[in-house]
Amino acid sequence: MYLTDEEKRILDGERGEGGRKAMELLVALGKTFDAEKLIPVTRTHVALSGQEGDTYWCELLVNGGATCKVPPSTNPSWDVENLTKLYEVTPEERELGVRTIDVYRRIGAKLTFNCAPGLGSNAPLFGEHVAFSESSATPYVNAVLGARSNRESSVSALAAAVIGKTPLYGFHLPQNRHGEFFVSVDAELNEPYDWGLLGYYVGRFAGSRIPVLSFRNLPRKPRPEEFLYFGAEAATSGAVAMYHFAGITPEAPTIEAAFGNKRIPEAELTVRSDDLAEQEATLSVANASGAINLVMLGCPQYSYDQLLETERLMEGRSVHSETAFWILTSVDTAELAARSGMRGRLEALGVRLAVDTCIDEPCWKSFEGGLGVTDSPKCAYYRERRGQPFVIRRLSECVNAAIRGKV
Amino acid sequence: MTGMSGKVSSEGVRTYKCRSIVKGAGKVSGEAIVSRGAMCFYLCDPQTGTVIERNHPIQGRSIAGKILVLESGKGSSVVQVDGFYQLWTKGALPGAIILREAEPVIVSAAVVVGTTMVDRVEGDVYELIHDGDFVEVDADAEEIRVGTDMLPLLKHGTPDKSS
């Protein structure tokens, strides 16, 4: 792998141990993929997780004198200050939460705490070379925006942020962005939830391959949140970091173009509404019914339009007294909702907004032992690992469950 | 490629070329443990380095301080990095890892904690290295040395140590 003199000097520690470690990681990845060289990135996004190993890496870099050359936007961790007033965590969990936020601040990250950067807080343009971690963000910026990012881990994205470069391999090369299998879709797709089911279904067959989807009878083009849900779920059941919607996404003006003008393969999958209904039924690991203690929406974090839709579906009814209703969103969206009056109206009904917070954090563990409801298969997957089963339902049914306190 | 590649010294130490991915300590030696399967390090007991993943080829055995011959890594980056980190804090990581197939997540995790990692050994590592062999991984020279007894390997190492 070719390194410039400056890159070699960083690797030799000229800019301190932090720069050396970050460069070591980029070079090791470059070697793994036989990258020819490093290329500059214009944006980065770090999926900080609040797990100890991840926080340690950031500390190692910043204590070694590193700061970010391309300040990354960041995933949410959790709102330590406000959520500890409501829910119990251990002193260790609290300490790690504080430590994580502090160390990312010190390294010069842009603390957006938003897992959907492509929808606004850090949206690249077509053709930009970027390094984005967060499995739902990478397919969005690649497929929907036409930017170029590999499926980064939080540690490799942070290394790219520090050095301002990434190894040239994978999705940075045009020839690796073409479709690898063909999916024909003729199903009803009305809201983000349906697109999420489709993503989950396609991801199961995809592995890490690039699907090309062609739609019949699609009444309108998908909205940003719908693309986001598709990618988030395709990256949960599979490792999809790039996809094409023929005639819709920017690198797929036609099916032929999506396949790089090579022969179009036979459809490997045909997806109908029945398949999605079946997918929905088998997804809900907790096919339980009964009392619920939590409705959790916002994985990925909810947009302003999704909050509006939730308010519309509430129809002025209040959340059941034994059920908590939390929607996770970004600080910008929550602020906009507050100044527009919507946040106050939602809260008056018992619907609360949590900012800066992910579903997979210790602040939610007081709900473990009870049953939850969510519109996100990804949320259910991660919460189940931590010990709370979730029933997966579309938004309108989540709202009804919240009001009735049961599912 | 076969087990006939590499060089054999008079004391029976076989030397093979490899590629250095993460230098770590540079030169590390120890007893080999061979896993014919990918690993998620999160599924190890951090206190002992014992593999606890059900039905894993080396389930129930410890990788702590060993030279781990491994197919590849698996699992999400968050858990793999945290797995390496937890083992590292308890001193239960392998001394070095010889990969058959490098993948980005395990490579990133090894850089974070500084574990020596090599790949592209000339020949099939599953034929060249067996459980209980003594192996020296030399990431600086991009070589691995394999013997059935530790002694020749230590002798081999002597000139380097004096320099």
Image (spheres, coloured by chain):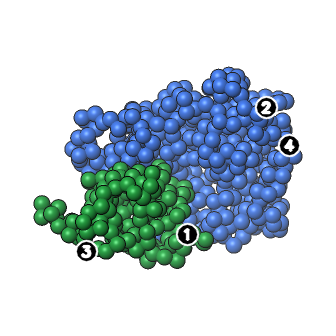
**Same chain for the residues at labels 3 and 4, yes or no?**
no
> What secondary structure is found at the residue carrying circle 2?
strand
Residue shown at 53%/51% (left/top)? A76
* Colour chosen for chain A: blue
Query: Mark 1 to mark 3: distance in Å?
Result: 29 Å
Q: Tell me whether circle 2 and circle 4 mark residues in contact (CB < 8 Å).
A: no
**Same chain for the residues at labels 1 and 2, yes or no?**
no
> What secondary structure is found at the residue carrying circle 3?
helix
Residue A224 position (above or below residue A389): above
Query: Mark 1 to mark 2: distance in Å?
Result: 44 Å
Where's residue A388, x and y in %? 68, 67
User: Of marks 2 and 4, which one's residue comes earlier in the chain?
Assistant: 2
Q: Tell me whether circle 3 and circle 4 mark residues in contact (CB < 8 Å).
A: no
Please indicate, yes or no, whether residue B31 appears anywhere in the rendered image.
Answer: yes
**Mark drawn on residue A273:** 4
Q: Tell me whether circle 1 and circle 2 mark residues in contact (CB < 8 Å).
A: no
**Same chain for the residues at labels 2 and 4, yes or no?**
yes
Where's residue B82, x and y in %? 47, 62
- In the rendered image, the quadrant that contains the C terminus of chain A is bottom right
Query: Mark 2 to mark 4: distance in Å?
Result: 12 Å
- Where is mark 2, residue-wise? A215
Quarter of the image where one finds residue A72: top left
- Where is mark 1, residue-wise? B57
Where's residue A267, x and y in %? 77, 35
> What secondary structure is found at the residue carrying circle 4?
helix
Residue A125 position (above or below residue A6): above
